[in-house]
């Protein structure tokens, strides 16, 4: 019963979000704002995580390399982990904590302080006005962040290999290139785009339908993160099955 | 004219409005009064469609708002200005931006025309010089006044004010009452004011609806209210010592 209610309400919510914006100029301005909040403001954290992740993957794999496992496995593993899983899945999951809670608490506060009612009374489609720029900003920014993450992860893997001497550059480079299928990157971008839609829309849904006061806003913001992460993980499984096998 | 016909609204088992009917007239300040929790805010929200009534009809100058499609509702909505009980200012925007927002969204004005209009609205609520502040930097009463400025910026045909002068000092409250009366007369607006401030009821009301336990227990004007033979109404009106003294004189 509960889940069917939510699916129905979420669907109606998304249909409202997708209506044509009332005022193009105002819409473009808030899109730019959202791209700053969602994209630009996340560059730092994504860069930091990716640099460390690439480096750690390199050292961990180096630790396994002995005897019959060739040294180029290091470059190969760093590449596969970053491109297939870390960048496209874990980055959105981590950002769901940052961006999702931000979206839900902003919309939740606007709901309980009647700001959403104030928009409605002016004849504005509040769901579209507030949420569509966030979803589009996510679709634009997350793939870019993820590509940056892949690039930084591979770079830092190479750097740490070189600095610690666990692999020479030629082996690392061979590992990066061996059996490379560019479809993997496309798969990653498709995943990221879908995860970004899940993250922004699920969080917005939780914020938008908050009732009550500060306590409920906090609860919505927690729910936003939890549900976003769980749904991202479930769709990760489904998408991987559909796209890779 | 706004007409409510047999509006009922419940939340679960809690029947907040029971078969409420009322008429609000243009060019008049129509008051809804009643105790806290009696359903005044729910009644206004049902009127403007922020809550869907379980039953009944709302007519805006004969247009049946309740059964309208969202698109047609939008048209009526742009003719409505509303002041919310808590102000409901957009806290990411400055005072001026708040007042300008409806103009930006819907009017054909140039930027200069909008700025003139915004300055005018801000002046009417006596907040000159505060245009660049954010709502968080204002007192509760000042936020209310910005809310009024925003509500009147589009020159609405229908104006709803939920407790316009709660949280205001008596002097500012009088200024706001006077502003509401003036703009109502000037533009022939249909104004609905929710209040439990007896002072402004006496000063500003043209018609009064007293709501008690979800029903309209009295309907009339000032003079009629003061002599009405209703216990619940009298209890409400003469709750304060000041009003009792006035009566006893
Ligand atoms: N969204 C809601 N869900 C459930 N109950 C509600 C909701 N909104 C209002 N109520 C209930 O309806 C009743 C009337 O509320 P309303 O806000 O209309 O009171 P009011 O007359 O405006 O009071 P006040 O003068 O304090 O603002 C209250 O008992 C309240 O608990
Ligand atoms: Mg109220």
Image (cartoon, helix red, strand yellow):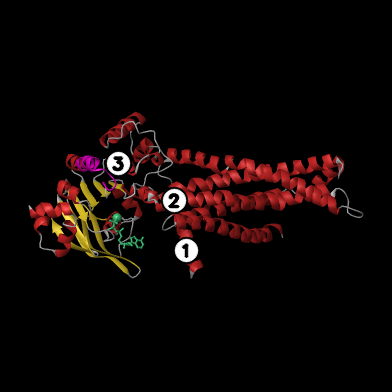
The majority secondary structure of the magenta stretch comes to helix
Q: Considering the numbered disc 1 on the image, is that residue within a helix, a strand or a loop?
A: helix
Task: Name the residue at 30% across, 62% down.
Answer: B53
The residues bearing labels 2 and 1 have C-alpha atoms spaced at a distance of: 23 Å
Q: Which residues are magenta?
A: B164-179
The residue nearer to you, when weighing A91 against B2, is: A91
Disc 1 versus disc 3: nearer the observer: 3
Which callout, 2 or 1, points to the residue nearer the camera? 2
Q: Which mark is residue A109?
A: 2
Looking at marks 2 and 1 on the same chain, the residue that comes earlier in the sequence is marked by 1
Q: Nearer the viewer, residue A91 or B146?
A: B146
Q: Residue at x 34, y 49 (%)?
A: B86
Q: Chain of mark 1?
A: A
The residue lying furthest to the top in this view is B112
Q: Indicate which quadrant contains ligand 1.
A: bottom left
User: Judging from the image, what secondary structure is the residue with disc 3 in?
Assistant: helix
Q: Which residue is mark 1?
A: A8
Q: Does the numbered disc 1 mark a residue whose Cβ is under 8 Å from ligand 1?
A: no
């Amino acid at each position: 019963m509960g889940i069917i209610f939510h699916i129905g309400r979420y669907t109606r919510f998304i249909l409202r979000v997708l209506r044509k914006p009332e005022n193009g100029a105002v819409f473009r301005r808030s899109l730019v704002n959202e791209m700053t909040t969602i994209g630009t403001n996340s560059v730092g954290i994504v860069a930091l995580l990716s640099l460390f992740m690439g480096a750690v993957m390199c050292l961990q794999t180096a630790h396994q390399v002995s005897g019959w496992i060739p040294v180029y496995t290091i470059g190969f593993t760093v590449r596969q982990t970053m491109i297939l899983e870390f960048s496209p899945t874990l980055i959105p999951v981590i950002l769901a904590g940052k961006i999702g809670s931000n979206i839900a608490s902003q919309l939740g506060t606007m709901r309980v302080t009647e700001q959403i009612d104030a928009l409605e009374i002016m004849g504005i489609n509040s769901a579209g006005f507030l949420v569509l720029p966030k979803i589009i900003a996510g679709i634009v920014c997350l793939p870019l962040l993820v590509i940056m993450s892949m690039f930084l992860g591979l770079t830092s893997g190479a750097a740490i290999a070189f600095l610690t001497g666990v692999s020479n550059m030629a082996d690392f480079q061979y590992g990066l290139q061996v059996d490379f299928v560019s479809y993997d990157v496309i798969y990653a971008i498709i995943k990221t785009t879908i995860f970004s839609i899940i993250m922004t829309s699920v969080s917005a849904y939780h914020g938008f339908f908050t009732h009550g006061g500060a306590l409920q806003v906090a609860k919505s913001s927690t729910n936003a993160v939890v549900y976003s992460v769980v749904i991202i993980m479930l769709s990760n499984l489904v998408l991987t099955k559909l796209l890779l096998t | 004219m706004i007409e409510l016909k047999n509006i009922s609204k419940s939340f679960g088992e809690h029947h907040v409005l029971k078969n409420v009917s009322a008429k609000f007239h243009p060019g008049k300040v129509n008051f809804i009064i009643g105790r806290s929790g009696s359903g005044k805010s729910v009644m206004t929200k049902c009127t403007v469609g922020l809550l869907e009534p379980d039953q009944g009809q709302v007519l805006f100058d004969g247009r049946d708002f309740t059964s309208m499609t969202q698109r047609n509702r939008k048209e009526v909505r742009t003719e409505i200005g509303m002041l919310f009980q808590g102000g409901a200012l957009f806290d990411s925007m400055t005072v001026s931006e708040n007042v300008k927002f409806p103009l930006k969204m819907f009017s054909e004005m140039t930027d200069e025309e909008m700025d003139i209009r915004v300055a005018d609205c801000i002046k009417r609520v006596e907040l000159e010089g505060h245009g660049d502040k954010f709502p968080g930097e204002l007192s509760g009463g000042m936020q209310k006044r910005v809310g009024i400025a925003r509500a009147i910026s589009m020159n609405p045909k229908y104006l709803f004010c939920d407790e316009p002068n709660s949280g205001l000092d008596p002097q500012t409250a009088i200024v706001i009452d006077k502003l509401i009366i003036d703009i109502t007369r000037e533009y022939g607006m249909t104004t609905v004011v929710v209040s439990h401030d007896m002072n402004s009821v006496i000063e500003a009301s043209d018609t009064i609806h007293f709501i008690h336990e979800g029903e309209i227990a009295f309907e009339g004007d000032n003079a009629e209210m003061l002599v009405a033979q209703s216990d619940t109404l009298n209890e409400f009106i003469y709750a304060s010592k000041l009003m009792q003294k006035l009566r006893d004189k």
